[in-house]
Image: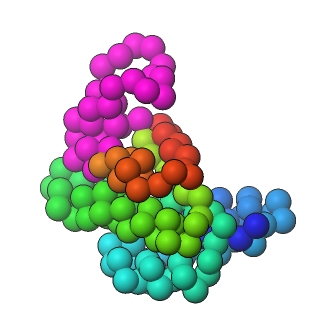
Amino acid sequence: MKVLVTGVKGQLGHDVVNELRARGHVAVGVDVDEMDITNSAQVTSVMRREKPSAVVHCAAWTAVDKAEQYPEKVSEVNALGTKHIAEACKRVDAKLIFISTDYVFEGTGNTPYKTNDERKGLSVYGKTKLQGEDFVTAILDKFYIVRIT
């Protein structure tokens, strides 16, 4: 299976590529230099060239506190970038594994969240990852959303 991994220069993306390769998969890691996720044409071009069976979308703006200072840029990366990835996955019929966050929830509960609990991101980071989740679920039928803490 050929898997494209976004955000390969980050710790998670790097580790995902290594783990996929160790398990015998063809893993293609890309980062902003090879595929700027905020550029729809670039995403489409890379996806059409690589034709992956699946995409693990690790690329994101992850500086949670700093996100409050740059809401437009964070939205461009976490929401719009994810939309571009989802659209490209649909075009090449690839499954998407979207790495999201528990920041999509309100954060005031004292029990573990369930998959379908109400989402209400309170920070710029949480809201933009929530928007990314919404793009994924609206565009694709074949996807997984993984919320990490």
* Quadrant of the frame with the N terminus: bottom right
Residue 3 versus residue 65 in the image, above or below:
below
Picture quadrant where residue 3 is located: bottom right
Q: Is residue 115 magenta?
A: yes
Q: Is residue 114 magenta?
A: yes
Residue 102 versus residue 79 in the image, above or below:
above
Horizontal placement of 84 versus 47: left or right? left
Say whether residue 72 is visible: yes
Say whether residue 8 is visible: no
Magenta part, dominant SS:
loop
Q: Residue at x 17, y 56 (%)?
A: 71
Residue 2 versus residue 124 in the image, above or below:
below
Q: Residue at x 33, y 58 (%)?
A: 78
Locate residue 125, reporting x and y percent. Answer: 28, 47
Colour style of the rendered protein structure: rainbow
Locate residue 59, reporting x and y percent. Answer: 45, 63
Write the start and end of the magenta stretch as one range. Answer: 102-130
Picture quadrant where residue 105 is located: top left
Front residue of 29 and 11: 29
Locate residue 123, reporting x and y percent. Answer: 23, 41
Q: Residue at x 53, y 43 (%)?
A: 146
